Image: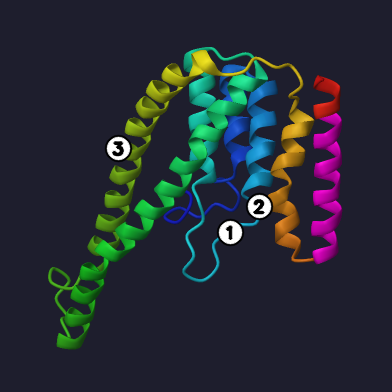
Amino acid sequence: MFRFALNFGFVDRPLVAALFWSYITGEWSVSLNLAIFFELFWLDLFPAGTFIPPQSLFSTFASITLIHILNLNLIEEIFFAMILTIPLALFGSWLEGRQREWQNKSYNQLLKRCRRGYQNENKFCPGKLISGSILQILTINIVFAYLSIHFLIFIYEKIAPILPRNSFLAWPYLWIFASIGGILSLRIRRAYAVFFTGVLTAGAYLIFKSL
């Protein structure tokens, strides 16, 4: 709801959600490391014009929930859970776009009422259209989150047995990978070249180290 209906600054950011979760549960380390990853990963995708960004908050919420429910400890397991949530974050923004299209009917009703010049509050009440739209997107997001969490648990439990158990992954490496979002937001070619050179160098080092 903090994405569009209730505007309180940066409340809808992954870091804020992780801080609230950590304060309640005491799980500071994994939650904040995970939130930093998603902050960097989605940094280049922000609401501008009619563009609806992916649900970065859902990625954070779903990942933390999976880690908590499945009691994941290895960083390889945690990273795989995080990757699973990314397509659903994109699907969630697609649902929000469809909800906006559904609301075109309400917008057309509002235009008709304005053109007819209704003065009676019972007949002309734009607040009802707004509250109805908020209730609709709230219901969609609740159902979407509930079904997605169960789907993610099902998929993870099916694939988890075949996951590699390597020990070379670490949060700084994941942050470097996620930094592609921040680099893309700069719109500077030299920054792209430096970043990808660094990534290739780090990748070569990890491969050489694992041999």
Q: Where on the picture, by quarter, is residue 194? A: bottom right
Q: Are marks 2 and 1 in contact (CB under 8 Å)?
A: yes
The residue labelled by disc 2 is 43
Spatial distance from mark 2 to mark 3, Cα to Cα? Answer: 26 Å
The residue labelled by disc 1 is 46
Q: Is residue 1 visible from the viewing direction of this image?
A: no
Query: Is 164 placed above or below 148 here?
Result: above
**Residue shown at 52% from the left, 41% from the top:** 57
Secondary-structure class at tag 2 = loop
Q: Which residues lie in the magenta part? A: 189-206
**Residue shown at 67% from the left, 38% from the top:** 37
State the residue in front, 13 or 210. 210
The residue labelled by disc 3 is 143
Marked residue nearer the N-terminal end (2 or 3): 2
**Residue shown at 26% from the left, 72% from the top:** 107
State the residue in front, 211 or 149. 211
Spatial distance from mark 2 to mark 1, Cα to Cα? Answer: 7 Å
**Residue shown at 75% from the left, 25% from the top:** 170
The chief SS type of the magenta part is: helix
Q: Are marks 3 and 1 in contact (CB under 8 Å)?
A: no
Secondary-structure class at tag 3 = helix
